[in-house]
Structures are given as structure tokens and as C-alpha cells.
Amino acid sequence: MNRKSPLRICPKKAAGLYRNTVSFRRAYVPDGKFFKASDFWRDAAADIPEVRIKLHYRSILKASTNALDELTVLVAPKQLFDNADRGCKQSNFILAHEAGHISEEHHSENAVSKYFQLFATETGVANIPPTIEELETNYAATFFLCGPAIFDLRRDALRLADVAYCDIYYIKKVRKLLEQQEFWEEMQKLNSTPRAVF
């Protein structure tokens, strides 16, 4: 994939993503608690009649959320779920990415199917978001798994990735935003009641 300039998230958008996603996260767990994204989906499907999980035995590199009216269906390989249950960060990040589409209401904006896909590269597989919406959803996945702990710089990125089952690359990207004054100004402006989704 050749791009003239890489996709970027501006601090204003990142602050909004944080607010929405952490509000969504707080409906599931309190701040300071970490969880596997597979547990989130399993609990959501058990507690919310409009959420379902459809597991299959095909490729482990692809998952999707499908939304139609009030029904949300996560479609994922069983192996992906099993890997997430065992603590695989990449598998948990993929499932959190799908939750990010829900928290950001991407299904209401356009197509009803949202996919997470890994791409083969020279060094293995990589998550290369093809659109700004997919990049935003990767940030949402990071906020979803880490919660407010993303701001605690006493815990280095690797330790946070380990306890939050998150992609260390995106933890580092998000933390780069924390260095920007514009991000904190937007966080102050958004200090109103966040929307709750699901």
C-alpha cells in the first residue's frame, strides 16, 4: 500500500475518541480494571439480547462487526477468540477494534459491516489501516483496553500492554498525543457528560 502521507489523528479527534470510548468502557468495568476483549464480547452477548457472536473456523486474520437496526453481530474465527482468551495481545486488539466501531457508532455513518484485517508484510503481519475511520478505531481499541491508565506514565508502554492485552505500538502512538497541548485543551472542553452507547 503506497500512501503519499501517513494517516494521522489530530489531537481534537483523539480527545473525542477517548471520551466516547472510555464512557463505553465504563459501562463494562470500572477504571483501573483490565480485561480481555474476548470476555467483553462474551459478557455483552450474554447480557444484551441485541449482541451476538458468530464464530467460524476460517482465517484468524479477519474479524468483523455487522450491525442492522438494533442487532450487532461480531463475526470472528474461533481461533482468534481462543488466542484472546489465552492473553494474545494482537487477538485482543482485533476484538477491541471491533468494539471500537460500536463505541464510535461507525455503523450508523455508512456501511453496516466493519472489518479488521491484518496484511502480510516483509516482517510478518501488520495492521495497516486503509482509512481514517479504521485508524480512529485502532485508537478507540487502545482507549478501550487501557482506559485512563493510558495517562499513567509511571507504567511504561510494555507493562501497560501486558496488563491491558493491548498493542504496544498503539499505546506508544497514543502517548505521543499526550505530549501535545492541543490534546489537553480538547480534553478540558470535552469534560462534559460523555455519551453512552450500546
Image: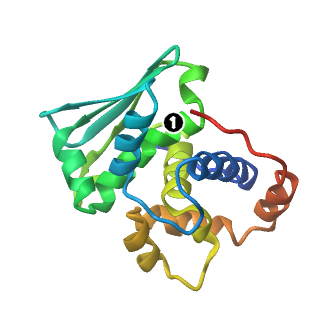
Q: Residue at x 79, y 64 (%)?
A: 184
- Give percent across and percent down for residue 44: 43, 38
The three-letter code of the residue at mark 1 reads His
Compared with 13, 90 (above or below) is below
Q: Secondary structure at mark 1?
A: helix
Q: What is the quadrant of the C terminus in the image? A: top right
**Depth order, front residue of 160/194:** 194
- Residue where numbered disc 1 is placed: 101
- Give percent across and percent down for residue 131: 51, 36
Q: Residue at x 28, y 45 (%)?
A: 119
Mark 1, other Cα within 10 Å: few <14 / some 14–19 / many ≥20: many
- Give percent across and percent down for residue 179: 70, 72
Residue that lies at the very extreme toward the bottom in this rendered image: 154
Q: Is residue 151 visible?
A: yes
The quadrant where residue 175 appears: bottom right
Task: Say whether residue 25 is left or right of residue 126.
Answer: right
- Give percent across and percent down for residue 157: 48, 76
Compared with 177, 20 (above or below) is above
- Look at the image and name its color scheme: rainbow
Q: Residue at x 61, y 77 (%)?
A: 152
